Each structure stands twice: as structure tokens, then as C-alpha cells.
Amino acid sequence: MADHERIVCESAALVEGGRGMRFDVPGQDRVVPCFAIRFDGEVVAYVNSCPHRGTELDWQHGEFFDESGLYLICATHGAAFDPASGECVSGPCAGERLFRIGIREEHGRVVLESDTGAAQSS
Ligand code: FES
């Protein structure tokens, strides 16, 4: 792992369709709130900002999935997102996407990739 990469959490902390891990990424002029979840066995991370109004998605701290565990939901107006692609599949921002950031698993840990692009997300 390169010096500039950052460990977000242990891999075991992210279970399929379960609680997400919130973390921050330094942006150009502010800290960018992000989150990681596990879906279809893969760890995926997005900027924690709904394309509709820019509010954070989680309905309770770290809770992003709906009760089925198949969609991410926005707590503000109920938009539903495909966890794998970040595309809004229903709600006021249908067709828009969450901003994905680079993350991977390595040696049992979830690692933020060095160039996440989060600084340019908003
Ligand atoms: S702010 Fe997310 S659906 Fe409106």
C-alpha cells in the first residue's frame, strides 16, 4: 500500500446490504463526506450527497440501505439508488447518479484509493 492511501475500515466491518462506513475525504476547499457499503460482495463508495438537494443520504448514522438491502435510499425525499452503479432508480433525481469514489479491499482492509476525485464532486 502506498503512503498516500488511507485505510477506511476492516473488510469485516462491511457486511452485505448492511450498515455503511462513513468517512471524510479532504477536498479543495472543504471536507467531503463519503460512505462505503458492501453489495454483491464488492465494496463500493460514494460521496454522501444526494443529487437532488445535496443532503446526506443516511436515515440514521451509517444506515444507507432500505429494509430490503437492495437499494440505497435518501432520507430526505426517499430517492432509491442502485448500490452497484449509484444510479437513482426512483424518486426526484431519477436517472442521476451518486458520485463514486475509488476504493478497494486489500489484505482484509478497505483502502481509499489515492485519487478519489471527491474534491471535484461539488
Ligand atoms: S434530497 Fe435526496 S431525494 Fe431529495
Image (cartoon, rainbow, N blue to C red):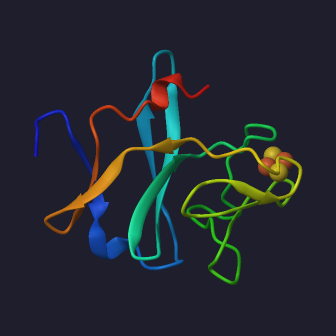
Name the residue rendered at 51%, 33% in the picture. 32
Q: Nearer the viewer, residue 13 or 45?
A: 45
Relative side of 82 to 76, left or right = left
User: How many numbered circles does the render carry?
Assistant: 0
Q: Position of residue 104 (x, y in %)?
A: 29, 55
Tell me which corner region of the image, top left, top right, bottom left or bottom right, holds residue 42.
bottom left
Name the residue rendered at 67%, 70% in the picture. 71
Relative side of 86 to 119, left or right = right
Q: Position of residue 14 (x, y in %)?
A: 40, 72
Relative side of 119 to 114, left or right = right
Q: Position of residue 95 (x, y in %)?
A: 77, 48
Relative side of 113 to 73, left or right = left
Q: Position of residue 60 (x, y in %)?
A: 66, 64
Name the residue rendered at 67%, 46% in the picture. 97
| Figure check: 105 above or below 27 | below
| Figure check: 104 above or below 25 | below
